[in-house]
Amino acid sequence: MIFKKKLPLIVCFIVGILTLLQYYVPNKVSIGYLETMTQWDIIISAFAFLLGLASLFAMHYDKIRRKTQGWGYSLFMFGGVILGLTCGIISKANQTNQEGFITAFGWIYNYVLNPLQGTMFALLAFYVVSASFRAFRVKSGQAFILFLAAVIILFGRVPLGQLIWSKFMSWLPFGISEAIEWIMNFPSTAARRGIMIGIALGAVAMSLKIIFGIEKQYLGGKE
Amino acid sequence: MDFTAILGAWIAVGLTLFILSFLYRDNPLFKIAENLYIGIAIGYIFSITIYNVWIPKIYQPVSNRVFTSLSNWVPWVSKFVTPAGDAGSLTPLFPAIIGISLLTRIFPKISWISRYGFAFIVGYGAGLAIPATVATMFIAQIEGTIQPVFKLASGGAIDLSGPALWTSFSAILLCLGVIVTLFYFFFSLEHGKISKKVTKIGIYFLMVYFGAAFGTTVMGRFALLYGRFFDLYTYRTSGYYHATPILILLVLIFFFVYFGKSRKTSP
């Protein structure tokens, strides 16, 4: 029981309290502590990445072994890992060599990873637009404000919107760029700050709960 | 044109079209690209982890220390192995052991050992988060909200000319906006008649923020889309052996064959 539950909580408490205190007691020892712990955290996180990798591999291997529907696609996942890793090892994870030429690792990034990542996120543009048709039904004053802010930001940043503004809204003493800047800097920032302050209070409360062992979900398991 | 650039262009166009094909319907081409994306991304991050963490932060210091100690005890070792860099250190073994303990999560019987690794990561993160959050997300935000209003109050006579009046109005609006937004999230007391009106104003500020955030997100996504279309446009030329039109045609042929077949087989 002590080794399974209490000692990990004590480790969390000691590491948490020492890390918290080092910020408020700046001296040679606390700076050295932070530097060492940061290096330790990087090393441990590298192993945490391995844990995620093992979990993903197990899932896809199981799919292939059982020949469940769509198991063939898992082969592409493994193929991708082998390809990415091989290119990384050949190029020692450098995108360009000493002569400035692109390496296999850089090639994989430019022609495979970047297009895949860019298109995957760009795909969301279509769904966001279709979602906006539902979200922008102006049924109340609040919905109208949401619609107005989004439309000004969207149209104000493209040439067509700027043209429309200059044609029909030129009687106003400010341009669309100024309007966007004002919205972003004042009413939008006000709400963002309110949310951020709330998040900060929540994060501090949660961190204290973790350090003092009240929150222990991260331990996992029943024992 | 370099062969690797041409090959890269064909692969980039193909994968872009495979993913965009999802706009019509879920299909095998999209699933291939999706799984390949996960695999390549993992391989890429794994390589970076090996060369930025495991080799320089664990292997090199530990092996240097081991070889230095060995060559002190057994002098002939230094004839065969010369440690690169300094004398090294065995200290990285401690976090490495804690890190390895995380991997025991895979084996249910000894998974409790992984708690030490998680306790370290979570405790360190929590300890680091408190001062960082208080400084940047709490004090700095309050300071940024109050300072413009404070400047107005300490400036002596209030300037009522156009631009100065607008600046003053904006500063007060910002301060009030933060207060009413916070008021909206304050649930410790039941909202009465007046406070309900205040929270309603808070909702208006939140709506402006959500609208602005929505607009910015959409613009970001479209910027990515322009980038992809720009690549498709660039790779259409004879220099790339017309990669874009040929691959669009091939994807369309695949669609006709694949979906034509599934339409025939479906009852």
Image (spheres, coloured by chain):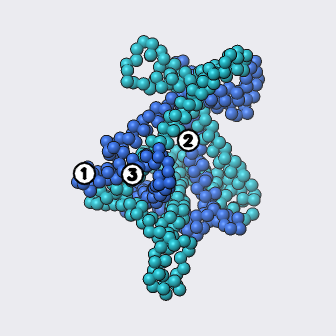
Chain colours: A blue, B cyan
**Label 2 and label 3 in one chain:** yes
Q: Which mark is residue A124?
A: 2
Quarter that holds the N terminus of chain A = bottom left
Residue drawn at 69 percent across, 62 percent down = B5
- Residue A189's place in the image compared with B132, above or below, is above
Q: Residues within 10 Å of mark 1 (few under 14, many from 20)?
A: few
At label 1, which amino acid type do we have? Glu
Tag 2 secondary structure? helix
| Residue most extreme to the top | B193
> How many numbered markers are drawn?
3
Q: Residues within 10 Å of mark 2 (few under 14, many from 20)?
A: some
Looking at the image, is mark 3 or mark 1 earlier in the sequence?
A: 3
Residue drawn at 47 percent across, 19 percent down = B199
Q: Nearer the viewer, residue B164 or A33?
A: A33
Q: Is residue B251 visible?
A: no
- Residue A57's place in the image compared with A220, above or below, is below
Task: From the image, tell me which residue sits under label 1.
Answer: A223
Corner quadrant of residue B226: top right
Q: Is residue B142 visible?
A: yes
Relative to A92, is A59 on the left or the right?
left
Of circles 1 and 2, which is in front?
1
Corner quadrant of residue B147: top right
Q: Measured from the top left, where is residue B23 in percent x and y? A: 56, 43
Residue drawn at 50 percent across, 22 percent down = B180
Corner quadrant of residue A189: top right
Q: CA distance from mark 2 to mark 3?
A: 41 Å
Task: From the image, tell me which residue sits under label 3.
Answer: A15
Q: CA distance from mark 1 to mark 2?
A: 42 Å
Q: Nearer the viewer, residue B62 or A31?
A: A31
Relative to A118, is B191 on the left or the right?
left
